[in-house]
Image (cartoon, coloured by chain):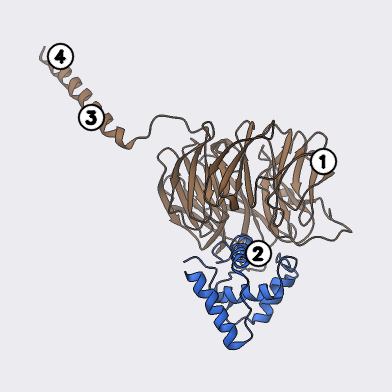
Chain colours: A brown, B blue
Amino acid sequence: MGTSWSAEARAAAGAAALLAAALAGCAAQPALRGTGDLGIVVERASGSLLVVDTTARRVLHRVTGLGDLSHASAVFSRDGRYAFVFGRDGGLSKVDLLTGRVVARRVQAGNSIGGAIGQRGELVAVSNYEPGGVRVFDARTLEPVADIPARGADGRPSRVVGLVDAPGRRFVFSLFDAGEIWIAEMDPDPRRPRITRIRGVGRQPYDALITPDGRWYLAGLFGEDGVALVDLWHPERGARRILAGYGRGERRLPVYKMPHLEGWAVAGTRAFLPAVGRHEVLVVDTVGWREVGRVRVHGQPVFVEARPDGRQVWVNFAFPDNDTVQVIDTETLRVVRTLRPGRGVLHMEFTPRGEAVWVSVRDEDRVVVYDTGTFEPLARLRARSPSGIFFTARAGRIGL
Amino acid sequence: MPRRFSVCAAALLAAAVGTAAAAPPPERAAELARLVRNDCGACHGLRLKGGLGPPLTPQALAGKPVELLVATVLEGRAGTPMPPWKPFLTEEEARWIVEGLRRGDFLER
């Protein structure tokens, strides 16, 4: 009897405590919602970012105090709640999309260029120019886990670009100055990564990408025409040169903005890559890795991105043609639409299933959302000097 | 305010030494300042502290001859990604940019 009474009392007290906790929590906890349709827009000049809702097409939060965000990029935690933002000044910030708060921040180097989150979601790696190398952090706390200084065969430090995550708990990256590709295995002990060095891959790899299946790593070369290709199923085979001399016999134009390879553009068995110093997009067969075509475009391509279904490829351009975006039909390899969103088009990001694309227009201080079927603008959002746009669908993709 | 001051300072300096670049009209000056931050900044960093390209801060440029820097801006530098900006800038404008960089005019305050 007494026992049952006291059990009831305990239950009641427990319920009251729970209720109190829930009430107290209301103030601090964000409303329940998923993050699958959220993303961020980097505001490069003001060191801030916008958390956006791609369903309502509106801004949820502005997050400030993120340092120098020129050339900033972001990856997401596997639950899609947190963005890890890589700033130019070496700042690594972890932002809670639901509350719009910076939950952790660390200035980890003097000058950095991008990053990746590991397959298990517990490690975040950052590639740095100064000091050249890769640093790896605990994704929960941003505490340092490993430091991988990058030095070429001659012992000189090298800037690091094209850092991606690969299956098998690996990070892969390229050494711009040394012309090498390194694979860092985080197993068995992430504090002591095992490094595989692939030397002599070509002059000045400037950026890289990994195929959606995580097998092929492609580093674009700036110092020569061509792309270095590594089969991550067989890294022991080293790097192979593809598209060597794609500009043979042609004068290369000066490059006013480095192209990016982050936006992997693949449609069926064709990949689309920016040609360096040319007004062309290269089309490559992903089975034999041979060039199968070229698409003449408006300017020097910067981002070449496939709509998720692979039917269209959207391209933006380097200065002075950066007011334009073109759409390539991947079946006919023809430009089917030329859009002029405004001066300073810096980035494009598709919604997860590709019905819309968000385009940042730096000099107009806005983001324009286009319907990819009709090419009509669906919305315009105010943003200060917007650059990179990153949606949480990236959380589930290999490489990012 | 700082911009107006530096433009004045540049004009005064030009008058005093006779070698400095004349400041472009205000609208063009604003356009050039944007170009420096955004387009030079694409490689040298929005805050010009360096990236793929070296830093363009006053400290980094101190001791480098103005003529060499002007030539680099106009002609680019072979063997590096630095392109020639000649199609978009006059020599006078390149000189004005170089002098501005050396004074830190384009850095955010």
Q: Same chain, marks 2 and 4?
A: yes
The residue drawn where x is 24% and y is 26% is A19
Q: Chain of mark 4?
A: A
Q: Chain of mark 3?
A: A
Q: Hey, which quadrant is residue A278 in on the image?
A: bottom right
Q: Secondary structure beneath disc 1?
A: loop
Q: Is residue B92 above or below residue A270?
A: below
User: Residue A116's x, y, as percent?
Assistant: 56, 47
Residue A152's tag is 2
Q: Secondary structure beneath disc 4?
A: helix
Q: CA distance from mark 2 to mark 4?
A: 74 Å
Farthest residue, direction top: A1
In the foreground, A381 or A48: A381
| Circle nearer the N terminus (1, 3) | 3
Residue A288's tag is 1
Q: Chain of mark 1?
A: A
Q: Chain of mark 2?
A: A
Residue B58's tag is none
Which three-letter amino acid code belongs to the residue tagged 3?
Ala
Residue A20's tag is 3
Q: Is residue A54 left or right of residue A154?
A: left
- The answer to whether residue A366 is seen in the rendering is yes
Q: Is residue A167 left or right of residue A45?
A: right
Q: Secondary structure beneath disc 3?
A: helix
Q: Is residue A338 above or below residue A354?
A: below
Observer-side mark, 1 or 4, equals 1
| Circle nearer the N terminus (3, 2) | 3
Observer-side mark, 1 or 2, equals 1
Q: Same chain, marks 4 and 3?
A: yes
